Image (cartoon, helix red, strand yellow):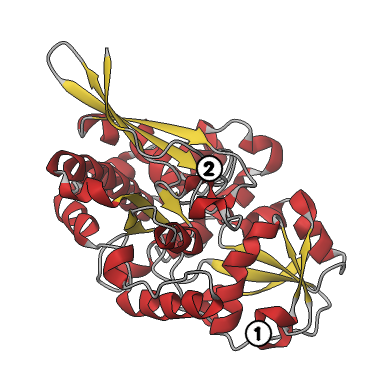
Amino acid sequence: MENRIDEVFASQFTRADFLKRAAATGVGLSLLSGLEAAGALGADTATQTVRWISPRGTLDVMDDFDLWVPVKQGYFSKLGINAKLIAGPLGDALATTKFAAQPGVLTASIDSGIAVKSIWDMISGQVFDFALPTNSPIKSVKQLAGKKIALGSAGWSTIVDPILVGAGVDPKSVHYVNAGNQWAQATESGQADAGLAWEGLRAQWAGQGLKLKYLIGTSFSKQPSNVYSVRAADLSDNSKVDLYTRFLQGMIMGLEFAKANPRAAAQITYTSRPNLAKSLKPQAAYDSFLELAEAYGTSHRAGQGWGYSSPSGWAGYLAIVHKLGQTKKMLSPSQVYTNDLAKAANAKADKATAIADAKAFKLNSTFAAVDPGHPNI
């Protein structure tokens, strides 16, 4: 018999029913989009089920290696967690404010009275990029003023607007083109001057034969990226804090495993989702994984541990979204995120086991033949 201990919110999304369904979208990078906890009572021990809802509408991506590794290596199980990864719908950006979201979805949700808080920043910095046609003369974000920007959903404008403001561009000066699933092709063909992209997606598009060049987000923006969030009230419940901390511990083990043996983590993720082989060859899948892994490791390389939320990055971002009118209230960082669970999980995670497992992992012939490049995870 399953005894639910956390209803969490009930909808799903492409990337994060929030802001009272006000705007519309958050992109689907690799973040936590819907954490739902339930207690499964066994004969002698109790396991807790955590349901993670993807904001991308699919699990057939390399983004979620930090979840597939602990699932397949049994790290979640050893921590008393039955992790279920669920594909959410692509299109309603506000449908997943619940447990994982793009920053704009999170802040809009809080502003509208939905009490949620981030407990983990996937990338301590900007994950979004701008794709350009290969013959584009554009060399900086400032040159996007007055241009057409292709999006996969109209709601993604809530993601792009703060990025533009941060770079000194008035969002009202650009024209957004809602090209649906063909937004990359619209950019490549020149129907748009630029298109929203993100780390991990660049390599996927290259592997699919798309010819594009990029303005890389980390070179022009310090704004936060995707987060894992929970009900703010849950953070006053010790049992739920313990549950979420253990979930983060499992993820950290997955990240340490990936750092120690990148090709092994890529192989585990690729073989966990057979449909990936239909769209990505192993080398392109590995390259996509590596873009993401290096981005996920930003705060770790800076000595702040995995999942760290940058106070300065968040402070600047919160000021911009308030100025844009995306939030009616000027939110304070303490209303939006906490580093407490990430700090505790970094201290408790069994990193040594994950590293040893990674080093002992036997690659199959396919991934043994993949060019590992020069990982900087």
Q: Place residue 25 in its image quadrant.
A: bottom right
Q: Residue at x 49, y 74 (%)?
A: 321
Q: Is residue 38 above or below residue 172?
A: above
Q: Is residue 80 above or below residue 373?
A: above
Visible residue check, residue 209:
no
Which residue corresponds to mark 1?
170
The N terminus lies in which quarter of the figure? Answer: top left
Q: Residue at x 60, y 58 (%)?
A: 23
Which residue is more in the foreground, 356 or 58? 58
Identify the amino acid type marked 2: Phe
Visible residue check, residue 130:
yes
Numbered mark located on residue 250 in the image? none
Q: Is residue 337 above or below residue 216?
A: above
Which residue is more in the foreground, 145 or 106? 106
Identify the amino acid type marked 1: Asp
Q: Place residue 377 in its image quadrant.
A: bottom left
Horizontal and vertical percent position of residue 294: 44, 63
Horizontal and vertical percent position of residue 279: 70, 41
Q: Residue at x 26, y 68 (%)?
A: 334
Sequence-wise, the earlier of marks 1 and 2 is: 1
Horizontal and vertical percent position of residue 325: 54, 74
Which residue corresponds to mark 2?
367
Mark 1 residue element: loop
Mark 2 residue element: helix
Taking 246 as reference, is 268 left or right?
Answer: right
Q: Residue at x 64, y 66 (%)?
A: 157
